[in-house]
Image (tube, helix red, strand yellow):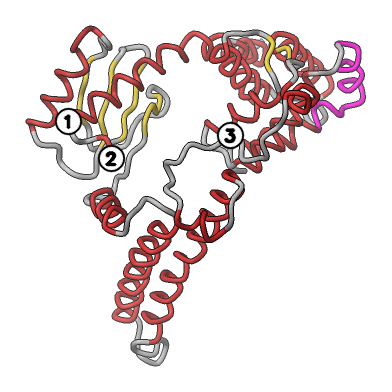
């Protein structure tokens, strides 16, 4: 009975996500507007406690009373958000709080980064690369200097480690500039050199791919509304039920089902439709902080499973392939 009760609790996740997502988005927008007015957007992270309808601000540096008062006034201004506000320098309680906005928790770093980018004509791939190289190089040199003080000279030659780490940090800026330039060039269909000097705020087509004609757009399976979220969720929990009797090694564990059905329900709620497209699944996973490559692979896999007929889904479950795909896809969504 205990395992059954646990599964019932996991099954409540999709409905809970669908109910909380619109409210969380409102809180996020209210926080961003208020934090921008108070000048603390870049240095604070914000969480939301649904049960208490409370926003908590976290920052590595002490917030002055004036900034906090401005933030609190803006939160309540115009009844945009009725959540209570508090400030805390202790780690969040992730069992109770939902992260709605993350900021830099390194004091002064956003100011240094933004000022340096502006002085170099950015933000561009070139300015990002230069700033990354300077900051990472300085950090590496400092870390090397510190390490040399703790180890005897017979282990670390004085000056060598700091130079090596400093150089490695500086060269990391080349990688950042190159990758950013390539992304700009591909998105805007231009040269790498022009992409290197293009402002990162330039509007582009997302995802980064060639613009498609109406005919190719219509024929691309990624843009076809083939993913029935209710059907996928039902199939996922059916496989969990099979795992209760056959073992979860070849079937979907309840926590995996809760993660994927909650994700799909959230995307469906955001799109305001029970039928969504594979590209919506990919973009939804990517917006949750997963890398685009992982999001594309996982999104295509989940969309393919969701696009099968109920008979096809049942056949995969009988063979244990459905559970195998879930074991392969879900951990990647959480960096495992």
Query: How far, Cα to Cα, is label 1 from label 3?
Result: 31 Å
Mark 1 or 3 closer to N-term? 1
- Res. 196 mark: none
Residue at image point 23% right, 30% down: 36
Q: Residues within 10 Å of mark 3 (few under 14, many from 20)?
A: few
Relative image position of residue 3 (x, y in whole percent): 66, 16
Dot 1 alpha-carbon crowd within 10 angstroms: few under 14, some 14 to 19, many 20 or more: some
Image height check: is 276 above or below 59? above
Element carrying mark 1: helix
Residue placed most toward the observer, 51 or 38? 38
Q: Residue at x 62, y 12 (%)?
A: 11
Provide the residue designation for mark 3.
Answer: 206
Residue at which label 1 appears: 38
First to last magenta residue range = 310-324
Left-right relation of 205 to 157 = right
Q: Position of residue 58 (x, y in %)?
A: 26, 35
The mark lying in front, picked from 3 and 2, is 3
The residue lying toward the viewer, choosing from 282 and 87, is 282
Q: Which residue is mark 2?
A: 42
Would you identify the image quadrant in which residue 79 lies?
top left
Q: Is 254 on the left-hand or right-hand side of 19? A: right
Query: Compared to 206, does 196 lie above or below?
Result: below
């Amino acid at each position: 009975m205990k395992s059954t009760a646990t599964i019932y609790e996991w099954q409540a996740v999709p409905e809970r996500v669908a109910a909380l997502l619109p409210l969380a988005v409102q809180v996020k927008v209210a926080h961003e507007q208020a934090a921008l007015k108070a000048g603390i957007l870049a240095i604070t992270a914000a969480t939301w406690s649904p049960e208490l309808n409370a926003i908590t601000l976290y920052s590595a540096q002490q917030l002055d009373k004036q900034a906090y008062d401005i933030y609190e006034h803006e939160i309540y201004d115009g009844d945009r958000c009725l959540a209570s506000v508090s400030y805390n320098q202790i780690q969040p309680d992730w069992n109770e709080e939902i992260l709605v906005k993350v900021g830099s928790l390194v004091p002064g770093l956003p100011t240094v980064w933004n000022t340096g980018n502006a002085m170099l004509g950015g933000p561009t791939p070139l300015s990002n690369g230069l700033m990354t190289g300077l900051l990472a190089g300085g950090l590496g040199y400092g870390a090397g200097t510190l390490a040399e003080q703790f180890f005897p000279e017979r282990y670390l030659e004085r000056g060598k480690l700091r130079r090596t780490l400093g150089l490695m940090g500086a060269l990391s800026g080349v990688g950042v500039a190159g990758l950013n330039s390539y992304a700009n060039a591909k998105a805007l269909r231009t040269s790498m050199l022009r992409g290197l000097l293009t402002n990162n705020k330039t509007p582009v087509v997302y995802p980064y791919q060639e613009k498609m004609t109406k005919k190719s757009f219509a024929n691309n399976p990624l843009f076809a509304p083939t993913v029935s979220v209710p059907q996928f969720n039902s199939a996922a929990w059916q496989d969990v039920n099979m795992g209760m009797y056959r073992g979860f090694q070849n079937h979907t564990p309840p926590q995996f089902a809760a993660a994927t059905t909650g994700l799909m329900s959230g995307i469906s709620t955001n799109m305001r439709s029970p039928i969504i497209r594979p590209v919506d699944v990919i973009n939804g996973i990517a917006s949750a902080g997963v890398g685009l490559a992982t999001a594309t692979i996982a999104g295509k896999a989940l969309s393919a499973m969701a696009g099968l007929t109920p008979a096809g889904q049942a056949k995969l479950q009988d063979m244990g392939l459905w559970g195998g795909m879930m074991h392969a896809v879900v951990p990647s969504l959480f960096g495992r």
